[in-house]
Amino acid sequence: MRNFFTSILGTLVALWIFLAGVVLLVVLAIAAVTTLGPKTTVVEPGSYLVFDLSTNITDSPVREGLAELTGSGEDTLQLRNVTRALQAAAKDSRIAGVFLTGSLEPEGYGAGYAALKEVREALVACRAAGKPVEAYLDFPRTRDIYLASVANDVVLDPYGAVLLPGLSSQPMFFTGALDKFGIGVQVTRVGKYKSFVEPFTRRDMSPENRVQTQKLLDDLWSQLAGDIATSRGLGLEALQKAVDEHGLFTAEQAKAAGLVDRIAYRDEIIADLKTKTGRTGANEAFKQIALSSYAAMQLEAETEKKSKDSTIAVVYAEGDIVDGDGMDGEIGGDKFSQMLRKLRLDDSVQAIVLRVNSPGGSASAAEEIQRELRLTRKVKPVIVSMGTVAASGGYWISAYGDKIFAEPTTITGSIGVFGLFFNVQKLANDYGLTFDVAKTGKFAGLFTISRPKTDEELALFQSLVDWIYGQFIGKVAEGRHLDRAAVEEIAQGRVWSGTEAKKLGLVDEIGGLDAAIKFAVQKAQLGDNYGVVEYPRKKELTEVVTDWLQGKGHEQTRGTDVVSQLMAQIKEQTAILREFNDPRGIYARLPLEMTVK
């Protein structure tokens, strides 16, 4: 017995020492960050702004974790910080040019083509201002080439390659696996193009889904290829011919096709930049400043100039729309509507710009958010800026904007509704598990997963889906000032590019976030005396540490091997089901797999 208590005591002491050590490390980290404070950044005249593309560019402010604070996390940049830095560099006499390198690392809803369109335009502005844009690449993909094609000089590593095969969307279908494991699926839906349920009910695309997917890809590719061809001085037909002949270009093939200007090693490019910036020492680096550091300088300068009495609130709706508060990376109906309510009641906020980058989700949560936006619009302007995707529930919350901006490559529309219901009866029975029930009403146990829904129950859900779809159509017609019959014609769950959406009246203007902010300023008649405040705000250091202690840190970086990629894709697709928490089981969401690669 004595040995038992001795062992317990030793374990408790060891645990206490471990926890004390963790707390000490956290305290030291906080002390280091708060004591050292921000580093003073100096921009030497004649410096190049170094834009390392090895990052994920998100719409919303970066929600920092402990890894980012200690410098050990994956780089993530916010879109507005990137464009703001490039716009400032175009006017900064100290900046001699821009140097692009690396390869984008998209994750979640980041670094989409609509966001990259805004980055590209900022790079074009730099070049137009007489600041040369230099690009050095080793294995660029479509997104990288889309940005780098702006450069005055595009250089590729001799042993590098260009991956430019065109766009594709490859849905993953779970029907066979669900059948194998004995999991039943039943659906209700409205809209012949509403294809979210197809991965659970089919083994391939429906004809309707194939038509809408192909049209969307064609629209997006037309914009991307057109921009690349124009910047590279190529004919669109010549570019398409090269893409179809190669797809994966060697360095020599890329140069022959006009995708790059020359082939050289990295040290040769660095030597060129040293000469251009007046550095002669063998151990000296060329004059440079990282875009992230330069962006931080611009943010600090803007903060000092902000007007506290007249502000434009830029509100980011990025992620899936879910009921409740939601988690990081989700749009919680309760939490998001509460934030909008505070902004509505804040007299210093003169207008709201809603930046949407969402495929939708819970219909009830989308309505909760839209209700608050309708109330806000009665007292101050609400301008919508659509990012990479603003579809289904993402369009639901956008429909009542005073004006809707979108990029040509924005994925929008998908005005449709569905219900998705799983049951595990066969799976349970195969393992000897059975269910029984006693109830006091015909529809008691309506949401059980122990059995399939009856025909009457499915009819009940279908009537609810039909009603919500009718509401969706009516809201779009009212918010967009369109004839209801016209909306019914272009709805049906079909997705549209930003270009097509403007033709159909679902979007007002082609333009990015900056254009939306400028319009909001005009609408609110603020002149030059205003500030821009972003929501949700970045976490304070104490919140970051608390989240870390509670195990809410970032997941490990995704591997690049075949197994890791497959498992990551399965994890991403199945994880979406966790976000399906509408109490009625009814959703307005983009197809499960509409990832454009």
Image (cartoon, rainbow, N blue to C red):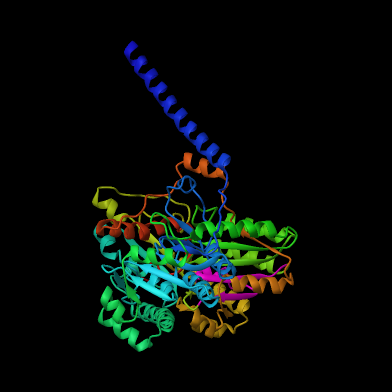
Would you place residue 214 above or below residue 158 in this image? Answer: below
Q: Which one is nearer the viewer's eye here, 467 or 297?
A: 297
Measuring from the top left, give residue 266's x and y in whole percent. 34, 64
Residue at figure coordinates x 48%, y 68% from the top left: 98
In magenta, the rendered stretch is 380-407
Residue at figure coordinates x 50%, y 84% from the top left: 489
Q: Is residue 246 left or right of residue 455?
A: left
Q: Is residue 400 magenta?
A: yes
Whether residue 204 appears in this view of the structure is yes
Measuring from the top left, give residue 506's x and y in whole percent. 55, 79
Residue at figure coordinates x 58%, y 46% from the top left: 540
Give the total of numbered labels: 0
Measuring from the top left, give residue 470's x and y in whole percent. 54, 75
Q: Is residue 337 magenta?
A: no
Whether residue 447 appears in this view of the structure is no
Q: Quadrant of the C terminus?
A: bottom left
Q: Quadrant of the N terminus?
A: top left
Q: Which one is nearer the viewer's eye here, 370 or 158?
A: 158
Would you place residue 346 above or below residue 148 in this image? Answer: above
Q: Quadrant of residue 373?
A: bottom right
Q: Residue placed farthest to the front in the image?
A: 280
Q: Is residue 258 left or right of residue 114?
A: left
Q: Is residue 456 left or right of residue 164?
A: right
Would you place residue 231 above or below residue 92 in this image? Answer: below
Would you place residue 246 above or below residue 272 in this image? Answer: below
Measuring from the top left, give residue 216's x and y in whole percent. 41, 79
Residue at figure coordinates x 70%, y 74% from the top left: 522
Q: Residue placed farthest to the top in the image?
A: 2
Q: Is residue 124 left or right of residue 532?
A: left
Q: Which one is nearer the viewer's eye here, 333 or 62?
A: 62
Q: Which one is nearer the viewer's eye here, 91 or 537?
A: 91
